[in-house]
Structures are given as structure tokens and as C-alpha cells.
Image: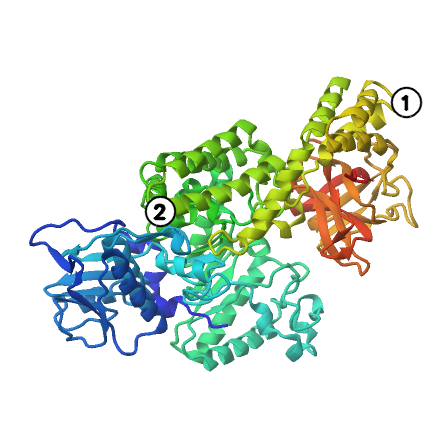
Amino acid sequence: MTNVTLAQHVSVPRRTILAGAAAAAALAATGIGHAQAEPGRNRRLINNGVAECILIHQPDASADLLTAITDLADRFEQVTGARPEVSTDPEATARTRIYLGFIGPGAGPHLSAKVNSLFADGFLITPFLDTVTVIGRLEGGTINGIHEFVERYLGVVSLLPTTVGDHIPTSPTIEIPKAELRSEPAFAMRCFSPMNQAPGEGPYPQMTTWAARNRLQGLNHNAPLAFHHNLFSLFLPSKYADRPELYANGKVPASDTTTTGWQPAFTNPETVSVAVAEIVAALTAEPDLTTFSLGVNDGAGYEVGFVPDDYYRWVNDVIAGVRAELGDREITYGLLAYRQVEPVPSFDLDPAVVPFFTEERLAWADDDLRAASQALLQQWQQRAAGLGLYDYLYGGSYLIPRMHVGVTADAYRWAAEHGVIAQYAEVYPAWGEGPKNWVLAKLQWDPSLDEEELTAQWCTLAVGAAAAPSLLNYYSFFQEFWETRAVDSPWFVPGSTYQGFNTLPRYLELLEPEEIEQCQTWIDQAVAAADTAAQQARADALARTWQYYRASALSYPRPVDQPTTPAEAQAILQDAADHTAERVELAEERTVLEAEFQADPLLIMTLRPSRYPQLAWSGWNPSEFWAVAGYLRTQEPDGGPVTTEAERLAAEHPAATGRAVAQSVLDARAVGSLTVNSSFETAGATTAEAPPWRNLERSTQTRGSARDTSQAATGEASAVVTGRGWGGPSQLVPAAHGFSQLVVSYRATTGNVASLQFGTDLLDATGTIRGTVRSAVRSLTRDGEWHQLVVNGEIPANISGRDITDISVVMLVESPADIEVHLDDIELYVAPRPEL
């Protein structure tokens, strides 16, 4: 892996780099569109379709710079019909010579000093006499300047990936102001995953091109900091297996490919010597390498009694050791300050360290969470010379447009004022989110811009002035939805590093049917009002994404409350009988659309929802099914009005699906729980055992569960989950296939800050997990009372061609500190899905 660092891409004194965004206080406003002609004050580059300029670069220009220069020439031709010549001759004859990446003959005075004072990959566009110079102190700055030139002076805007996303105006004449433009980013690092490679490369080449045109960097290409999980590369078992003392608790990883779940023994001084030797060897082998990641391995595995100071003292000692070996060579060290190593150390970090803080900044929509997070970062600001933020802007696996640029813009503005120099985000976009990623890219360069104006500007450029108000209404609706309603809903889990992008999409429960239809109206209006062919193509593409979002929202198996009266049960049954066929069709539609999107470089879902069991469904609603079946089982074991109505519908409903729904709930009355010892009443060899329950093997070492007789929801016993970390009791049962319902009761006391996710892992004959049916992660109510939770789902007979033979019932309690949570009456019911 080739890592490029701040020292390479921001090669000014580190005190300037690490002073944060405040060092670049004056940020140029971004303008879009052709420069307005001002006689005597503008320089003409294209005159009525004839090029009067020449593009000049040095003979040794890199592939990246040549790509940007070709892009510039292409854009000139697309806008004006004239393509300027590209040359390496700095004295080539032309009315205007445009120097790209160097200071040519006749360029402006004092230009070299101005260039050397630029922050990070900022740039200058300097017209002077018969020249224009586009240049950065770093090559990335020059490339950014070229893309700014294209957008500001030619009016070409890369709104979305692919040519569909290009807004390209036409004009036979291009003039630019003679005034110098200086622009510098607020953050030295700006990366969106998975757009991590060079423009036009990687698994999403259209997206990496879009990213470069919007002044983003590629993490694996030209980003100035390495910071990800990396300590596994310094302590390969193939080299150090005979030295278990180098590993936490003496546990040597199974192989060199075991990169998670373990750490070095930070308190052993020998690990410092090993790390120094390994880093020096890596830096010596790559003389241009100016960054190295000291990020901990993922998945815990720390020494018993570990405290964060152990790690940060180790980091300081390793850097000091490398510096002693390499002298003045400037290396910047990134790392991930998350989970176990998020607490502030009691001493200053070496000034070469940039810690990244992992949190989904959408949480800052909550006042208390924002205040707590900002307080922590301000404490860290006193210990580290510069900070990085690691965000989760996921779009690809969300089932409606995830628009939240308001709260994110506020986070960027705060960050720019508080020592943050680097931004990284896992985006994995779905481009049905429209302006979101374009707006955020703009704000990472200049957070002083107004996100609402940028959003409106994007909509206008995308679909035209007449269609823009409808499209703006559409995205504004979803911005309010995510920043207010979603954060205030049970879907949102406070304190979570990131929200459940791949778990049960309970946010869909917040959408009312009339709101879905209103969104349909806005999209229809935008499509109808789009003017040019290009605008129509973009409107049509966004409409196709809405088609998927709409099918997802309407087919989603919404939970229903357990009925308490015959009338309530009959209403649920009637609704299921009348509408299941339509929902099945919509579920099939979303499956077809997802498959079609995967072949489209614009609409492709980078996190394909169907890969996550909780985001795939058949259109049948297990919650409706179990609401009625449960009512019949508990309230009408010997028959009653709901039973009679179900029998009538099973015989007389006009739709085959309706008849099948009614008959299936009648058949489910005899279904019993698959779990054994559900209430933990039967003890094992010791009173703390309740076979066949056991603590889930992959629970963290600090999480335990046992039988307990001090509390019970029913009977005399329950399970108590103790310690900290993640995990809890589990039980393996033979598989049954169809609609599933898992019920659990829990009790948490005041002070127990914990969350619970519960469900079933679906195993094949080899014991491999092929899928899951789980609840959303839920913050526990801490009032000392018993609460019952239910998750409904479907268990298929096979997944990806593998038969499901066993079901593991799992209770996953997560807490940052020691807790005590009781669980009881864990019952799993599975009934066959109706055959049509």
C-alpha cells in the first residue's frame, strides 16, 4: 500500500499544518458560470468558436495532471466547440498562454512567493498580461485549480457521476476576469469512501472522476494521511510467533491474515523496539513515504487492565524511536481514537500525531450528544496538534434519500474552528440522494458556504429553473425527516458510533402514506418541468431511484401493535388479506430495480441492500401475521369472533393471497416455541447454568451471562448479563422455515447505559452464518421494570444456495461500562409461509 502524508502534500512547517483550519481563514467564495464581460477588465480565451489560448504544461507532468488538463481541453470544446491546443512549449504563440502547474515566462510578479504560502492543496488562478497561471504549491493544488477553472469560468459542473451528471452550458465565447483567484481548503484532507483511487480508476471509476472534479482526494491515492487499522502489519505472526510476550495476554494471532481482535502488548517495552524497527524498514524502503498509520487493530483484544494511556504512551515512544533513527525526516502519524482508545490521555501526544474520531455526525442533531462530543474533542485539542473526523455518511443501503447536509454543515463549521485538519467519511453513496454529496464536497473545501443555497443551486442546475422548486421540496422534506424526525425516533441509537445502516430500517415506519404520495407528486412535477435533454435525463434518473425508494417504503413489513380487542384483530387481518398481494408485487419491483441499478454506473448501489437480511423482504408482513395468530392462540384458543372471521376470509376472500393469509393464521394457532428452557427455570450442573443456554462464543471477553434467581419476569429465574462490551446468552435450535417471531423480556436498572439487539443467526450444515433476522439496536429503558420486546421476520429454507439447518437465538447486549441486565421468557415461534 502506498501511503502519502501531510508532510508530502502539505509541506509547510507542521505548526502551520496542525494549527487547523483557522490557518486558512480567508476562503474564496465558489462561483459557477461564465465570467461576465467587463470591457478592458476581462481576458478572452475563446472568441466566437475560435480558440485564442493554448494550454501549456511541463514535459514531466504526471498522469494525474495530464488527466486534468485533458479534462480542461474537453470542457472547452464541449462548451464552445473550440478545443485549445495543448503544448509543452512555455513560449508557444497564442493570444493567451495558460500555464498549468508551473510559472512560465511573463507570468505575474511575486507569484512564486504566493504559491509557497498556499495552505494544503489550495491554488492560484492568476491572469497577467497575455498569460494565465493555474498552480498550487502541490500538484493536487494545480489539479484543483484546473477543476475550479472549469466550473467557475466555463460553467461546467459535475453534479453526479457519469456524463448524465454533467451540467454543460454552451457559449461561443469565453472570457475570464483579470483578477487573481486564490482558494485554499479548510481541511487538508477530504476523502469520501469508496472513491479512494485515482480519477477513472478503482471499482467505481465514474465516481472517482466525480470526486476529483469536486476537489476530493483518494484515500489510497493522494490523501495526505494514513490512519486506518494497521498495527497488525508490524507484528506478523509469521515473524514473531515465537515471542508471545509481544502480544496482549500472550495470545499470538492465528495467522498473518488475522488482522482483527488482537493488539500488541503496549506495556511491554519490547513492542516499541519491534515497531520502530518495522517502521524504519518500511520508510527506508519507500523514501517518498511521509505518513504511517499507528491505528490500533479493529475488534478489541487489549491487555487485561488496559487503559488508554498505555497505548498513547506507546505511540509517543515509537515515534521518538523512529525519529532517533531517521533524524529530520518528517513523518506524520495518523491513528483511530475510537472505542477503547477514545478517552483523552493524561499527557500530550507527539506533535506528529493526528488522531481521527469516529462518529456519525448526524448525531449532532441531538443537542446533548453534540455538546458531549464537542466537549471531548475540545479536550483532545489540548493534547494533539491536529485532529481528524471520521464520519459515516452512508447512502447506499438506506431505502429513502438520506439528506442531512444541515447538521453536517454545522459540524464542518465547528470543526474548522477547533483544530480539525482532516475529514474522512464512509459515504458508499446512492446517487438518488441528489445534492447531498456534491454539497458536502463543497463544504469540506469551504464550510462558510450556505448549504441551503448550494442545495438550491444543485437542483436548478440538475433539472432547470422550472423543475427545481419541486425537486428542492423533495430533498428538503427528507432533510427535515432525517435531521429531526429520525433522530427523535426509536430508530436512532444515542451513543452509537454509527447508526444501523444494515439493520431493520425502522425509519420507514415514520413515513406516512400521504407523504409517500406527496414525494411522488414532487418527482412527477420535476420530470414534467425539466427543460433540456440533459436536465430530462437527470430528472428521469432521480425518478427511477424514487421508484425504488417508494417500492421499499410501501412493501416494508411495518410492525403492528398486538391487538387487544376482536375489532382490532379483525382490522389487522382484513388489511393483510386485502393488501399483501400488492406489497408482494412492490417487493418484487424493488428486487428487479436493484438488479438493474447494478449495471448502471450512476444508479449502482455501492452497498447493495439485498446483501443485508434485514433490508430484504418478500412483501409478506410477519408482524401482521403474528399479531392475529398470537391473538387467536392466547385469546381464542377455543374459537371466537376473530376465528370465525378468519375462517370466512379463508373460504371467501376474492384474492388467492387473501385466502392464504387467513388460512395461515388459523394454522399457526398450534405453533409452539422452539427454544428450550425459555424462562431459565431449569438449572444445570451449577445453579448459574441453564442448559442449553450458553454465553455466545463471540462475545467480548468482558461480557458474561448466567442463570440468576434474584429477578424474574415469570417463574423463579432469569438470565443476568454482566460486565461490559458486547454479547450475551444464545441457544442453538433446529431450523424451521417461514414467519418467525422472537420474544424477550428485559429489566435494566438506573445507571445501566446499554443497548440490545436480539434475533436469530441462520446457519448452514457447516455452522456458517448465512443470514440473520434481528431487531434494530435499541437503547434499554432503565427503570427497573420488565419490558417485552418482539422482532418478527422470515427464515428462508436456503440462502445463496445453502440450506438453513440450524438457528442460533442470540441476545446482543452492548455497553461501554459494567452493567447488569436481566433477560427472561425468550421464545422463538416459526410458522410456515402460505403457499400460493
Instruction: Pinpoint residue 782: horizontal percent, then vertical percent.
Output: 67, 34
Count neighbours of disc 2 (C-alpha within 10 A) and say few if under 14, some if 14 to 19, many if 20 or more: few
Secondary structure of the residue carrying tag 2 is: helix
Q: Would you identify the image quadrant in which residue 720 lies? A: top right
Which residue, as the protein is rendered here, is positioned at the far left?
Answer: 40
* Above or below, comparing residue 727 to residue 64 in the picture: above
* Above or below, comparing residue 395 to residue 646 in the picture: below
| Residue 408 visible to an observer of this rendering | yes
Q: Nearer the viewer, residue 656 or 637?
A: 656
Q: CA distance from mark 2 to mark 1?
A: 66 Å
Kind of residue at disc 2? Ala
What residue sits right under mark 1 in the picture?
638
Q: Earlier in the sequence, mark 2 or mark 1?
A: 2
Residue in the picture at 54% in, 33% down: 488
Instruction: Pinpoint residue 522: horizontal percent, then vertical percent.
Output: 43, 33
Choose mark 2 or mark 1, whichever is in front: 2
Q: Would you identify the image quadrant in which residue 40 lies? A: bottom left
Q: Is residue 452 rendered to the left or right of residue 324?
A: left
* Above or below, comparing residue 438 to residue 105 in the picture: above
| Residue 401 visible to an observer of this rendering | no
What residue sits right under mark 2 in the picture?
533
Residue in the picture at 12% in, 63% down: 128
Dots 2, 1 in contact, CB < 8 A: no
Q: Nearer the viewer, residue 513 or 309?
A: 513
Count neighbours of disc 1 (C-alpha within 10 A) and say few if under 14, some if 14 to 19, many if 20 or more: few
Q: Nearer the viewer, residue 757 or 467?
A: 467
Numbered disc total: 2
Tell me the quadrant of the picture where the C terminus can be found.
Answer: top right
Q: Is residue 109 rendered to the left or right of residue 164?
A: left
Kind of residue at disc 1? Asp
Instruction: Pinpoint residue 748: horizontal percent, then vertical percent.
Output: 71, 36
Instruction: Pinpoint residue 283: horizontal percent, then vertical percent.
Output: 46, 77
